Image (tube, rainbow, N blue to C red):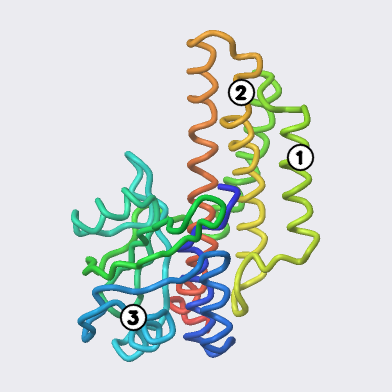
């Protein structure tokens, strides 16, 4: 939850490009991020993988007017609409992008290449057919914001009650890194998104930070298997709310288009 999903970058900056807010070069630079290269495979009309610039242009000619995000987890097909083959690939990757205006979806496959000490990441986006239907379990921005406020209180309470990752050098370092990113003016979303979407995504990432600290930094006061199970059970719905809010934020651009706001 701390790092921005690749599907989020593709959807956000792809939407900004489709809307004319950024140039193709700027959009691709933001989408690729720290990765070495992104390619798109299975694009209609192309027999081989192509670069992101060509792929985004081709999607536009195919009628794509916006991009949505899916962040599914076992038992929670968040943002998906089928068919089963696409859902299975998206669940395996834990993320996907759904095209608005064409029955297509993209699922990333990540490769690491290079020798020790000089490893670089390459991403192949597989284009697959999707079912044109409402995405599963995606809240509105208003719903997501209300749920997050409650989840933040719940996460803080759980961490305090179970004495999990609430303090110590590892937790403090993670929190300081999060604050440093925010203070650098990190672009949480691309140009064209409503301010409320930015606010919701920032809060979702903050909730995700607390959940990640709980899972990654030891067992804290939960010394028995029963106590550890209770901690996981308490944090699971909080993590679910944070993922739902992330999807709501990334999808806000398309949702506004559908409501005729844009």
Task: Evaluate if marks 2 and 1 touch, with contact meaning CB atoms under 8 Å apart.
Answer: no
SS of the residue under disc 1: helix
Q: CA distance from mark 2 to mark 1?
A: 15 Å
Residue with the mark numbered 3 = 50
SS of the residue under disc 2: loop
| Side of 101 relative to 247 (left or right) | left
Which residue lies at the image location 46% right of the left edge and 58% below the top edge?
114
Task: Please identify the residue farthest to the top as the structure is shown.
Answer: 224
Which residue lies at the image location 43% right of the left edge and 58% below the top edge?
113
Camera-side residue: 74 or 180? Answer: 180
| Side of 148 relative to 92 (left or right) | right
Name above or below for residue 33 compared with residue 78: below
Which residue lies at the image location 59% right of the left edge and 44% below the top edge?
208
Residue with the mark numbered 2 = 218
Residue 59, picture quadrant: bottom left
The label on residue 73 is none
Name above or below for residue 216 compared with residue 189: above
Q: CA distance from mark 1 to mark 3?
A: 40 Å
């Amino acid at each position: 939850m701390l790092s921005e999903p690749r599907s989020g970058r593709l959807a956000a900056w792809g939407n900004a490009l489709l809307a004319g807010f950024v140039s193709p070069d700027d959009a691709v630079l933001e989408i690729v991020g720290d990765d070495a290269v992104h390619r798109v495979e299975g694009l209609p009309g192309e027999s081989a993988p192509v670069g992101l610039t060509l792929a985004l242009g081709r999607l536009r000619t195919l009628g794509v007017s916006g991009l949505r995000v899916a962040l599914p987890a076992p038992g929670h097909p968040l943002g998906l609409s089928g068919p089963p083959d696409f859902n299975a690939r998206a669940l395996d990757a834990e993320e996907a992008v759904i095209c608005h205006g064409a029955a297509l979806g993209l699922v990333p496959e990540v490769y690491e290449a290079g020798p020790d000490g000089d490893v670089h990441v390459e991403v192949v986006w597989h284009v697959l057919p999707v079912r044109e239907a409402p995405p599963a379990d995606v809240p509105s921005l208003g719903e997501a914001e209300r749920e997050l406020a409650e989840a933040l209180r719940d996460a803080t309470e759980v961490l305090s009650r179970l004495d999990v990752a609430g303090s110590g050098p590892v937790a403090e370092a993670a929190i300081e890194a999060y604050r440093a990113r925010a203070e650098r003016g990190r672009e949480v979303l691309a140009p064209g998104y409503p301010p409320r979407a930015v606010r919701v995504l920032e809060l979702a990432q903050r909730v995700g930070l607390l959940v990640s600290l709980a899972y990654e930094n030891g067992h804290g006061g939960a010394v028995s298997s029963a106590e550890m199970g209770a901690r996981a059970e308490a944090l699971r719905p909080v993590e679910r709310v944070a993922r739902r809010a992330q999807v709501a934020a990334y999808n806000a651009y398309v949702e506004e288009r559908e409501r005729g706001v844009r």
